[in-house]
Image: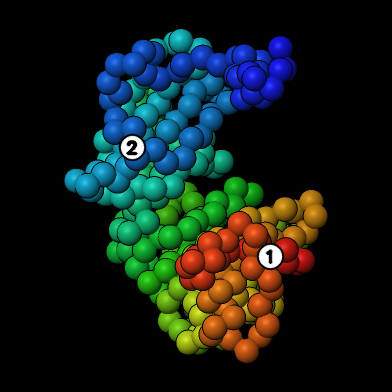
Amino acid sequence: DRSPSRGLGDVYKRQLPRRRLYPASEGQAAYDRLFPRQLVHDPAQNALFLGFGPTSGWASGVLRLPLDGSGPAEVLAVEGGMRSTELDPVTGMLLGVDAPRAEVNLFASHPFRLEQRVDLFGRGPVGDAISFWIDAPRERFYVIAYERAVITEWDRRTWTLTRSLDLHEAGVTRLHGGGLKLLFDARRDRIVALLGPVDAGDHYALADIDPATLTVVRSLILPMGSTDMTLDAELGVVLAQIRAALSSSSSSTPAAPASSSSNPSNPAEEYELALIHI
């Protein structure tokens, strides 16, 4: 029945099977469902991990849910603001990063527990860990900090600092802070870093970095402030979210036309998507 009176939403809801995984009923979950973070699937264990928090009490945690019914859901509470989680390709364990405190948490699964906590702040020039990337073939762990625009490289086995790259000293930014995100382009074997603002004009920048030498190969100043990016390695492009209105008022570089979905009543919230070939 695709009659207009029913609406396509009802049709699609009937066509897509779904199953409640957790909680099994409308009962109370063992974590605060108002603060879910990243959902990670571990194919080796056939389990889901869901990071959550931090809450107002500055506590976060991880839910582990076996998908094969081999055990109940388990929840671990973790002190601090652990916002990012992913599988560690070196050990196969779940890895979570507490960005404000620059701490790395490693979780073992049998039994489900916090196996190791690494304080990067006390080991190198790291004020925070706003974004990270794991280089499995080289067994290296890369972190970019917001408080100070520095990329640090760590030995993934020993957690010793091996090298660091100050993006201010490298000439990418005129300011000392502003690191935002790290991505890896496997096709070119390059780290792509987003940082900003990099000057008083609210410009942002992309830095193309060679992980073999940890040096900046080239950089690009974005004509408009950028808050996030993603990589399409197959097409060789970076998709960057930009703030068009702020650029047009603070830069002499012409801004692209405002998106039709932007809010004309608040020009500071006008966003567009930039396609950047790398």
Q: Is residue 278 above or below residue 103?
A: below
Q: Nearer the viewer, residue 254 or 121?
A: 254
On residue 33, the disc is: none
On residue 34, the disc is: 2
From this viewpoint, which residue is outermost toward the left?
57
Picture quarter with the N terminus? top right
Q: Residues within 10 Å of mark 1 (few under 14, many from 20)?
A: some
Left or right placement of residue 68 versus residue 102 in this view: right
- What residue sits right under mark 1 in the picture? 274
Provide residue 143's location: percent of width, then percent of height.
Answer: 48, 61
The residue that appears at 58% across and 86% down in the rendered structure is 251
Please, what is the three-letter code of the amino acid marked with disc 2? Answer: Leu
The residue that appears at 31% across and 50% down in the rendered structure is 81
Q: Residues within 10 Å of mark 2 (few under 14, many from 20)?
A: few
Left or right placement of residue 79 versus residue 99 in this view: left
The image quarter containing residue 60 is top left
Question: In the structure shown, which secondary structural element does the residue marked by tag 2 occupy?
Answer: loop
Left or right placement of residue 223 versus residue 125 in this view: right
Q: Is residue 225 above or below residue 272?
A: below
Q: Is residue 11 visible?
A: yes
Q: Is residue 148 above or below residue 239?
A: below
Picture quarter with the C terminus? bottom right
Q: Nearer the viewer, residue 199 or 95?
A: 199
The residue that appears at 42% across and 41% down in the rendered structure is 37
Please, what is the three-letter code of the amino acid marked with disc 1? Answer: Ala
Provide residue 139's location: percent of width, then percent of height.
Answer: 56, 51
From this viewpoint, which residue is outermost toward the bottom?
252
Left or right placement of residue 104 versus residue 198 in this view: left
Q: Is residue 184 visible?
A: no
Q: Nearer the viewer, residue 204 or 244?
A: 244
